[in-house]
Every structure is written in structure tokens, then in C-alpha cells.
Image (cartoon, helix red, strand yellow):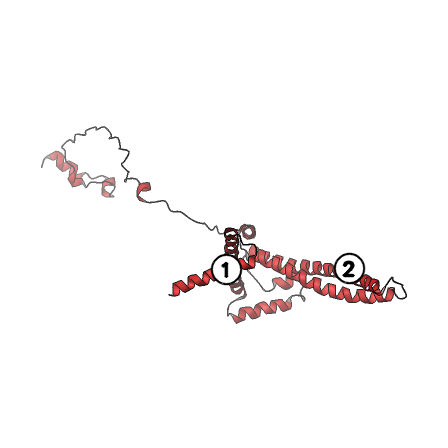
């Protein structure tokens, strides 16, 4: 071994010692290497390059990316960005049912008062015929029923809807549910019974109140999604089969599902 080769083998650089070189130092020789410059071959149109990552790995298609909201306002805005949100649907249902219940109760109360007021204020009045008297009495009762019903229904819908709306949105903003939201929002003595119901529900499923609310929300939104998918299937069947009545489309779709289940069972 010549003196020059010994010197090259003994002097190992830091980059080679750390393993950044592709070839070991023992393979280096003093023989010069001739490098030939070759022209780059032109690829044929039929050839498919396999050296690139894009050719080997197919692009992954992501159906939906769920972005987790970070702040309270982001969580509140996410309620209206989602299609099936429990907060939205629960508020609409409560407002609708409260208005209907208030309309019936207020209308019935107004009808009783209207009957008494009509009999008191129209004593001794002459009518064209007995049927005319009955007709005027019915008209007056219908007007008072509608007036009392709309007034009471609007008040009930406004009160209960605002309570549910504020409770669900405060929960989304804080990302935490507490049974004290109901009495704090609606008045201390007005919703204590509802808070007791919430506690009983949490005790029945053996979970804290916050976890019970999250579980209820998850099941609620799961049912909402299933109901939306069913309505979409019914609408699609009505458009495809030119069915006018929705109930007929529902019945036919149930028969189709039963036939599919029977085939799978066989």
C-alpha cells in the first residue's frame, strides 16, 4: 500500500464518520473514474414512468374533512354549517310544539270567555232567524278562539324557544353542559323541575350531566341523519316512479327494503 493510500484511509472526514456518505471510505481508491456524458433518452409515449411517487402511490380521495372548532364562536357557527345539528332541530321542534299547545290552550280559554261575553252583551237582541243567531255566535267564537290561540301560542313559543336556544348555544360556546343553565336562563324557580329531570336522566344512564348531554346529542343527531336519508330515498323514489302521494312512496319503499332483507336471509 502506498503512502498516499494510507493517508487517504486514515483521514476520515466528519461527514463520513456520521454516515452521510453513500459509500464507505474503504471503497475509495486513487484510480480516477471516467464519467461519460450521455444524451438523455426520449421517453416513448407508451412508457409510463414508475420512478416518481405520483406514479406509484395513487392519490387518496378524502370524502369529508371534519374541522374541530377551536373557539366558542367557531363552535356556535359550526351549528349552522352542519346539516343535521341537534341544537337547530331541537329549537325548531320546541317552538313548533309550544306554539301548537299554546294555540289550543289559549283558544279553548278564549272560546269559553267569548261565549260568556256574547251571551251577556247580546241579551234582548233580535235576529232575523234562529239560524242567524247561531251563525253570529259561531263566528264570534271562532274569531275569539283564533285571537286567544295566536296570542298564547306566540308567547309560549317565544319563551320556550328562547330557553332552548340559549341553553344549547351557551353549551356549544362553553363546550360544557350544566343543569343550572335552565334555571339561570329562564328564572331560578321556573326550570328547577327541568333541571331535576336532567339529573334523573344522567343518573339513569350512570353518567355525569355533561356526558349525558353529549350522549343524548350524539343519539339525537344519529336519528336525524337516518331520518334525512330516509326522506331523501322517498323523494328520489317519488321522482323516479312519478308517484304523487308520499305515503304511497313510503309504503312501496318499505316493501322494497323487506324484499331485499328476505333475499339476504335466504
Q: Nearer the viewer, residue 261 or 182?
A: 261
- Judged by depth in the image, the label closer to the viewer, 1 or 2, is 1
Q: Secondary structure at mark 1?
A: helix
Q: Is residue 116 above or below residue 42?
A: below
Q: Position of residue 250 (x, y in %)?
A: 52, 59
Crowding at mark 1 (Cα within 10 Å: few <14, some 14-19, many 20+): some
Whole-Å distance between the Cαs marked 1 and 2?
Answer: 43 Å
Q: Give how far across and how far down residue 22 sits, in percent.
A: 22, 40
Q: Nearer the viewer, residue 13 or 78?
A: 78
Q: Is residue 104 left or right of residue 215?
A: right
Kindly tell me whether residue 163 is visible in this rendering. no
Q: Secondary structure at mark 2?
A: helix
Task: Say if 204 sits above or below 20 in the image.
Answer: below
Residue at 23% x, 43% y: name it. Answer: 17
* Residue that carries the numbered disc 1 in the rendered image: 252
x then y, percent, for residue 213: 54, 63
**Residue hosting label 2:** 143
Q: Earlier in the sequence, mark 1 or mark 2?
A: 2
Q: Quadrant of the C terminus?
A: bottom left
The residue sitting at 83% across, 62% down in the picture is 132
Amino acid at each position: 500500500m502506498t503512502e498516499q493510500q494510507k493517508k487517504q484511509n486514515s483521514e476520515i472526514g466528519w461527514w463520513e464518520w456520521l454516515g452521510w456518505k453513500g459509500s464507505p471510505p474503504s471503497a475509495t481508491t486513487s484510480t480516477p473514474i471516467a464519467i461519460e456524458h450521455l444524451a438523455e433518452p426520449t421517453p416513448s409515449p407508451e412508457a409510463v414512468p414508475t420512478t416518481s411517487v405520483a406514479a406509484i402511490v395513487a392519490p387518496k380521495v378524502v370524502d369529508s374533512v371534519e374541522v374541530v372548532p377551536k373557539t366558542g364562536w367557531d363552535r356556535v357557527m359550526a351549528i349552522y354549517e352542519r346539516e343535521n345539528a341537534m341544537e337547530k332541530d331541537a329549537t325548531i321542534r320546541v317552538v313548533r310544539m309550544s306554539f301548537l299547545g299554546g294555540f289550543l290552550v289559549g283558544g279553548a280559554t278564549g272560546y269559553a270567555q267569548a261565549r260568556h261575553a256574547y251571551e251577556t252583551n247580546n241579551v234582548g237582541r233580535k235576529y232575523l232567524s234562529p239560524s242567524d243567531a247561531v251563525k253570529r255566535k259561531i263566528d264570534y267564537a271562532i274569531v275569539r278562539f283564533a285571537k286567544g290561540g295566536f296570542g298564547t301560542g306566540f308567547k309560549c313559543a317565544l319563551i320556550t324557544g328562547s330557553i332552548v336556544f340559549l341553553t344549547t348555544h351557551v353549551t356549544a360556546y362553553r363546550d360544557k353542559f350544566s343543569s343550572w343553565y335552565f334555571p339561570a336562563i329562564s328564572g331560578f324557580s321556573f326550570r328547577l323541575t327541568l333541571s331535576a329531570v336532567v339529573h334523573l336522566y344522567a343518573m339513569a344512564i350512570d353518567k355525569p350531566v355533561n356526558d349525558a348531554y353529549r350522549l343524548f346529542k350524539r343519539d339525537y343527531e344519529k336519528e336525524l341523519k337516518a331520518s334525512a336519508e330516509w326522506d331523501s330515498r322517498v323523494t328520489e323514489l317519488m321522482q323516479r316512479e312519478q308517484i304523487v302521494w308520499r305515503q304511497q312512496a313510503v309504503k312501496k319503499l318499505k316493501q322494497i327494503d323487506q324484499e331485499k332483507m328476505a333475499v339476504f336471509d335466504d
